[in-house]
Amino acid sequence: MIATKESTIDIFMKMVENRNPGQAEFQQAVYEVALAVIPFMEKHPEYKKANILERMIEAERIIIFRVPWVDDQGNFRVNRGFRVQMNNAIGPYKGGLRFHPNVTLSVLKFLAFEQVYKNSLTTLPMGGGKGGSDFDPKGKSDNEVMNFCQSFMTELFRHIGKDTDIPAGDIGVGSREIGFLFGQYKRLSNEFNGVLTGKGFAYGGSLIRPEATGYGLLYFVEEMLKLKGDTIRNKKVLISGSGNVAQYAIEKTLVFGGIPITASDSNGFIYDPYGIDAEKLAYLMDLKNKKRGRISEYAEKYGCDYFEGERPWKIPADIALPCAVQNELDEDDANKLVSNGCLLVAEGANMPTTPDAITVLQKNGILYAPGKATNAGGVAVSGLEMSQNSARLYWTREEVEGKLKLIMQSIHTQCIQYGTGADGKIDYLKGANIAGFVRVADAMLAEGHV
Ligand code: NDP
């Protein structure tokens, strides 16, 4: 029986590799879903008959375009822009824009594919998409970033719209970039609407949107621990990254009484055994969001250890929250977490844990929850920002955070519904993938062969 299932997955993955050659990240994301969904479809022939999974892995539309711009020295520069419109069965395409030199079509297809499931888990009416560019905002002046954003939007604006496709931020696209992109969209379309989320509060943004992914992650972790009769209080927490998600994951860890002891960037990580408290976090936010400095400067200021070119997973702690980038926690890292007695790994980033690392964590009984469930708070509050923009009103901080908390609790419940095994153990990965799949698949069945 097991052999049949494995071979069905193998055959499916060969097809995926042949149709998407060289796209390692996309293949990895599909494999993770296929492991859960293919056995599920065996018991639900209506999905299999309609070839739903094969249809889901094919993007509905991909746009690739040239982004010409001029730097401060007057040099003519060019980057590549992308928008992957993956699936709009349950709502308009929705997903962030990433500006990073490592952006490729494979990376954006993996992110768009994950986004379809994540958005479905929020239960809000949002399909999945993702976009971005291989442009690197690091080391660029504000003027150069604005020139780039205006050129990027000059092409993208034809393909997006408040009821068609609503981009947001991701790595390298924060409030500064969203502002420039929105300004250019407005000029080109002559419309002021909710076409982008993550906007500043002054021009249609939602309260709590900057905080949402990090906060949502911690709400989810608290639910996971609650089931075990435990809490975050006094637990040591490893966090990677020092961007948007990491900053607010640190902030909410403190609110729950946990002790965040690491943060990182693409150069290395800091280990602060006394904990990153509110004052140190304020310094970190200023360093990263305003001065655009390096995490090593935190170690210089507070006299703690800095590990150049390394990742935080070797430090003993109770909880690990990877919040930086895909594949940042591998098998060796997972083994270190296991031998140091870590209880729980929950993903703030998208696909930060490699498949081999997930196997190590699950085999050793570490609670593991995937990003499509745990980091869905960001897109959930983006969905709430869209609702506020459509209704032309603002909700209070308390209203938005209350809704965010309920959504994260509901995602946790869905994971339990679809991920609890006969032995009573919860497989969050399986639960998230099947729960995300079912809603989109049902909509696709209802909408016919489109
Ligand atoms: P930011 O750009 O704000 O921060 C990214 C962080 O990751 C920075 O600290 C960056 O360091 C670090 N980083 C980037 N590349 C690497 C690398 N190769 N190795 C180690 N560290 C690296 O992005 P976000 O915080 O918004 O996003 C972080 C992750 O969370 C991403 O995977 C994103 O897709 C995911 N996510 C974000 C959401 C959001 O609402 N923002 C929602 C859901 C998921 P450096 O400064 O050196 O570049």
Image: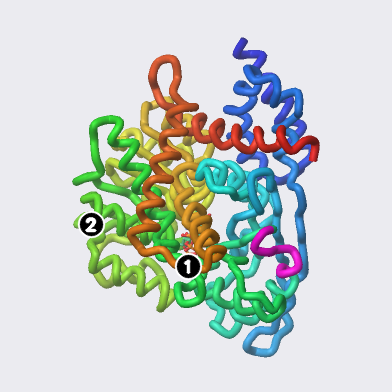
Disc 2 marks a residue whose amino acid type is: Gly
Pick the front one: 347 or 316: 347
Question: Where is 341 relative to 206, above or below?
Answer: above
Where residue 193 appears, x then y in whole percent?
Answer: 61, 70
Dot 1 surroundings within 10 Å: few (below 14), some, or many (20 or more)? few
Question: Is 294 situated left or right of 180 in this image?
Answer: left
Pick the front one: 20 or 210: 210
The residue lying at 71 percent from left, 40 percent from top is 57
Is 382 magenta? The answer is: no
Question: Is 384 situated left or right of 112 in this image?
Answer: left
Q: Which mark is residue 275?
A: 2
Magenta segment, which residues? Answer: 156-163
Residue 442 appears in which quarter of the rendering? top right
Q: Main secondary structure of the magenta part?
A: loop
* Quarter of the figure that contains the C terminus: top right
Residue located beneath label 1 in the image: 393
Question: Is 280 situated left or right of 333 in this image?
Answer: left
Disc 1 marks a residue whose amino acid type is: Leu
Pick the front one: 78 or 419: 419
The residue lying at 41 percent from left, 78 percent from top is 291
Is the C-beta of the residue carrying label 1 under 8 Å from the nearest atom of ligand 1?
no
Q: Secondary structure at mark 1?
A: loop
Visible in this render: residue 243? Answer: no
